[in-house]
Image (spheres, helix red, strand yellow):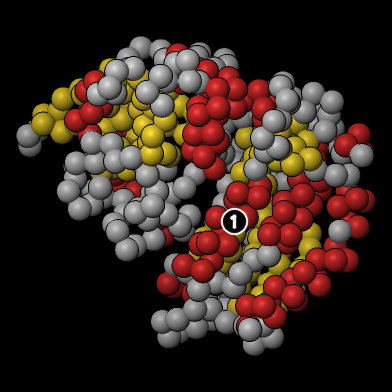
C-alpha cells in the first residue's frame, strides 16, 4: 500500500531545509483530548494544521505540565515511508506522563496518530536521503486550574515539519562540533525530572547555550549537579566517548540514565545496541554505561553526541573553564573517528533502508485509507486503558 502515499511535493527545494520549520506549514495535525471528569480519551483525529486554543489558566502555561517527543519519518527508495522506533517514543511519553500526573496515553493511540500525521502530510516527506519529516508529539495540561495541581483536561497533539539532513555532505563530511563545559549551570539533579522529556527542562538551558555560542562554541557540556565532575549531557544530546580501558583496548562509554538526571534517548539506545552487536573489532574492551569523569576526556580517542535532530554528531573539541577568565582544551580531534563513522553509517543505512532491518526498528506507514481503518478500534483501546487506570 506504500505506493498510495503522496510523493514529495513538486517545486520544493528540500535540499535548502535545515532542522527547523523552514517556512512550511504542513497540512494536518492530530488532536486528542482527555477529560478527567469522564476518565477516558476522546480519540479525536486529524485537523488542519493550526494554533491550539489554550485557556490562560491552563496548567501547561502556568505550571509547566507539558511533555513532548521527537521522531522522524524516512522516505524509502521505493517511495514508501517508515518511522524510526516510534514504540520507544511512545514508551518514554508514557513514563513521562506518570511523572507529570498526566493521563496514560495508550501506545496504540500514539502510534496511530503518528501514522496518520505522516500519511496525511506525505507530500512533505522529502525525497529519499534528502531530508526527513520530523514529528513532534505533545502531551500537555490544557485545562484551566488556578490552584497548583494537575490539569482536569489534557491535550495530545502531533504535528510535523520537513527538515533537511544535518550532514549535507554525508557522514564524515560535516565539521565536528565544539563543546564548552558548563561553569555555573547544571541541567538536572537527582530526584528531579531530568530523564523526562519535559518542556521545562529545555528553557533553563537556553542561557548556557547562548553563552557557549557567544564564546564561539557549538554547545554546552553539562556536568552532574552533586559534584560537578561527571559528564551528563551535551546541550540536548546524549554524550559518548571512546576511551582506553585499564585492561587494554578501547571502550565506548556513555553516562548511565538510572540516576534519573539524563534523558534515555532513542538514538542513544540504538547506538548502544549497534556498537555491542557489530563493533567488537574496534571496541575490544566493550561498551559501558557508567559514570564518565570529565578528566577521562583528556585521554579519549573519539567523542560524539546523539539525538533525534542530528542523529550522530562528531565532537572536535571539549573545552573546560580554567580559573576566572581562562579555558583549557581537554580534547581535540580533526574529522570523524572510526567508531563514530561506523556506527553512524550503520544507523543511517537502517533508517534509509539500505540494509536489512534486523532489529525491526522501522515502522512502515500505510496508505491513508488503511490508516483510517484502524480508527474504529482505537476508541475501544482508549476506553479500556482509561478503565484500567481508574481501577
Name the quarter where the N terminus is drawn.
top right
Residue located farthest toward the front when viewing the structure as drawn: 247
202 in relation to 336, above or below: below
Residue 307 visible within the image: no
Q: Quadrant of residue 179?
A: top left
**Looking at the image, can residue 208 be seen?**
yes
Residue 357 versus residue 255 in the image, above or below = above
Please give left or right for residue 283 compared with residue 181 in the image.
right
The residue lying toward the viewer, choosing from 283 and 328, is 283
Most extreme residue toward the left, as rendered? Answer: 323
**In the image, what residue occupies the spot 42% across and 43% down?**
236
Residue 138 on image: x %, y %: 59, 59
274 shown above or below 109: above
Q: Is residue 227 left or right of residue 165?
A: left
Where does residue 252 sit, x and y in percent of width and height? 39, 27
Asked if residue 172 lies left or right of residue 163, the reply is left
The quarter of the displayed image where residue 181 is located:
top left
**Is 15 on the left-hand or right-hand side of 46?**
left
Looking at the rendered structure, the secondary structure element under dot 1 is: helix
Query: Residue 115: horizontal and vertical position, in percent?
Result: 77, 49
Residue identifier under label 1: 91
Q: Residue at x 71, y 22 (%)?
A: 355
Q: Residue at the spot x=50%, y=13% of the render?
A: 173
Q: Quadrant of the C terminus?
A: bottom right
Label 1 crowd (10 A; few <14 / some 14-19 / many >=20)? some
Q: Position of residue 297 (x, y in %)?
A: 25, 26
Tag count in the figure? Answer: 1
Q: Quadrant of residue 170?
A: top right
Q: Residue at x 75, y 37 (%)?
A: 82
Amino acid at each position: 500500500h506504500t505506493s498510495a502515499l503522496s510523493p514529495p511535493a513538486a517545486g520544493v527545494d528540500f535540499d535548502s531545509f535545515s532542522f527547523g520549520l523552514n517556512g512550511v506549514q504542513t497540512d494536518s495535525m492530530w488532536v486528542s483530548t482527555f477529560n478527567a471528569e469522564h476518565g477516558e480519551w476522546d480519540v479525536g483525529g486529524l485537523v488542519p494544521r493550526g494554533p491550539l486554543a489554550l485557556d490562560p489558566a491552563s496548567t501547561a502555561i502556568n505550571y509547566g505540565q507539558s511533555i513532548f517527543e521527537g521522531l522522524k519519518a524516512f522516505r524509502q527508495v521505493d517511495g514508501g515511508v517508515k518511522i524510526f522506533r516510534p514504540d520507544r517514543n511512545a514508551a518514554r511519553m508514557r513514563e513521562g506522563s506518570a511523572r507529570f500526573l498526566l493521563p496514560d496515553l495508550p501506545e496504540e493511540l500514539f502510534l496511530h496518530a503518528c501514522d496518520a500525521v505522516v500519511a496525511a502530510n506525505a507530500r512533505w516527506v522529502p525525497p529519499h536521503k534528502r531530508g526527513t519529516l520530523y514529528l513532534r508529539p505533545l502531551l500537555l495540561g490544557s485545562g484551566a486550574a488556578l490552584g497548583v495541581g494537575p490539569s482536569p483536561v489534557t491535550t495530545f497533539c502531533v504535528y510535523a515539519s520537513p527538515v533537511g539532513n544535518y550532514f549535507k555532505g554525508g557522514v564524515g563530511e560535516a565539521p565536528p562540533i565544539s563543546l564548552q563545559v558548563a561553569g555555573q549551570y547544571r541541567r538536572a539533579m537527582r530526584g528531579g525530572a531530568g530523564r523526562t522529556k519535559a518542556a521545562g527542562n529545555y528553557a533553563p538551558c537556553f542561557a548556557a547555550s547562548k553563552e557557549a555560542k557567544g564564546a564561539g562554541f557549538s554547545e554546552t557540556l553539562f556536568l552532574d549537579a552533586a559534584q560537578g565532575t561527571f559528564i551528563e549531557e551535551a546541550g540536548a544530546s546524549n554524550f559518548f566517548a571512546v576511551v582506553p580501558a585499564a585492561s587494554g583496548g578501547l571502550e565506548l562509554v556513555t553516562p548511565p540514565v538510572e540516576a534519573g538526571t539524563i534523558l534515555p534517548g532513542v538514538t542513544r539506545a540504538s547506538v548502544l545496541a549497534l556498537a555491542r552487536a557489530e563493533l567488537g573489532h574496534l571496541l575490544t574492551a566493550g561498551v559501558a554505561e557508567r559514570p564518565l569523569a570529565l578528566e577521562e576526556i583528556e585521554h579519549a580517542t573519539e567523542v560524539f553526541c546523539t539525538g533525534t535532530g542530528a542523529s550522530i554528531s562528531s565532537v572536535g573539541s571539549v573545552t573546560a573553564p580554567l580559573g576566572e577568565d581562562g579555558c583549557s582544551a581537554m580534547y581535540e580531534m580533526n574529522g570523524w573517528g572510526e567508531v563514530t563513522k561506523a556506527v553512524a553509517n550503520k544507523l543511517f543505512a537502517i533508517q534509509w533502508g539500505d540494509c536489512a532491518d534486523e532489529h525491526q526498528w522501522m515502522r512502515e506507514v500505510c496508505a491513508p485509507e488503511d490508516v483510517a481503518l484502524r480508527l474504529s478500534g482505537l476508541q475501544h483501546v482508549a476506553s479500556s486503558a482509561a478503565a484500567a487506570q481508574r481501577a
